[in-house]
Image: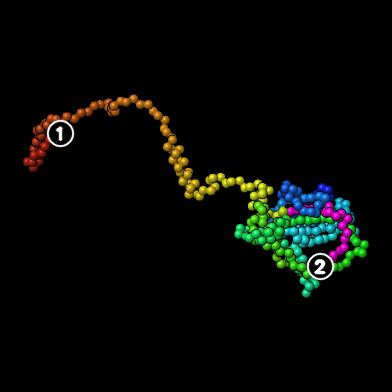
Amino acid sequence: MAVLPEIRGLKVSVEVDGRIAAEYADEDGPAQDRSPIKARSHHYSYIESKDDAHFAVTFEIEEGFCPFEALGFYLYVDGQQMDSILWDRQGRRPWGVWRHVVEGFRERDEERAMDRMRKFKFSKITTIDDANNQRVQQDIEASESMGVILLLVYNVAIRAEGRRDVYRPNQAAPKKPMEVSEKALKGRAVSHGTSYSDGPLVAPTRTVDVHFVDKNPIASFSFKYRSRDALKSELVIPRSPSPDAIDALSEAEIRRLAMERLEHLNGNRRSPTVKRENKPNVIKREHAEFLDLTEEPVKREWKKVKIEGNREAIDLTDD
């Protein structure tokens, strides 16, 4: 939420899809501000825009802290006035909070005597390279203020004749092309413009004649909206760190590298060396036994004995 220390009690914010957008400092904002309207106090910041996301702008005044009797708020989106609203202290509680939300552009519906709300929406810009000089010049003029939400706050006084109901003429929501020549952007990382979606019918507003106490605004709030990639390219937010080399590998490649590493480690691993003397292999036995195969076996005479039935048998009991 944007605040200015010079104007106590005044707060401005941009909501994207119902949530207050985070703000990032626009350090080059003062140098790049070529507007002929010179406000007393300035606020410059960036916010992140997303494709087809709706957005709204909210103004708040803590009335007990505001030193002014009446303020006029004028909202511009992409260089086109979208809304104006008056706050005045008369008849308000001394410690109340006044809040106004601008969700879109009001188109007059004459048949229903109502206003049709055309809700703000971020739309992606596409660039072309082959535009002719005439197209480039047209795109330069159309794109100079694209990607910017600007709020001007004036110190005003209500005219003596008082308030009167005045309905503005039938006016369609202003549109800008979302296809822009690359040369027209001149290197600016403009990623989105504002388009509109159909909203509900709403009651018409009442207009009031005012006098500008000061010629120039007492405050201006500038919000440049860019995609996240564009914010990174302009170094508004840090770039994402490069992923580790292993994050880019497939599971199969990681497994293969792990196996190669394991084989390398195993190849370098050696068992402790044992110093041995070069001696012949000898089998030591307690009792040596030798079998002489050179001699013929001794022929042995077997003893025969008589057994019952007048038969003969060999006696094996003798050595």
Residue 197 appears anywhere in the view = yes
* Label 2: few (<14), some (14–19) or many (≥20) C-alpha neighbours in 10 Å: few
SS category of the residue bearing label 2: loop
Gap in angstroms between the C-alphas marked 2 and 1: 147 Å
* Residue at the image point whose x is 88% and y is 55% from the top: 213
Which residue does the numbered mark 2 point to in the structure image? 168
* Label 1: few (<14), some (14–19) or many (≥20) C-alpha neighbours in 10 Å: few
- Amino acid type, mark 1: Thr
- Location of residue 128 by image quarter: bottom right
Residue 92, position in %: x, y?
88, 58
Residue 157, position in %: x, y?
89, 58
Which residue does the numbered mark 1 point to in the structure image? 317
- Location of residue 12 by image quarter: bottom right
- Amino acid type, mark 2: Arg
Residue sitting nearer the eye, 78 or 3? 78
Q: Is residue 207 above or below residue 22?
A: below
Residue 155, position in %: x, y?
86, 55
Name the front one of labels 2 and 1: 2
Q: Is residue 293 above or below residue 83?
A: above
Q: Is residue 208 on the magenta stretch?
A: yes
* Residue at the image point whose x is 10% and y is 38% from the top: 313
Residue 242, position in %: x, y?
59, 46
* Residue at the image point whose x is 29% and y is 27% from the top: 280
The stretch in magenta equals 202-223
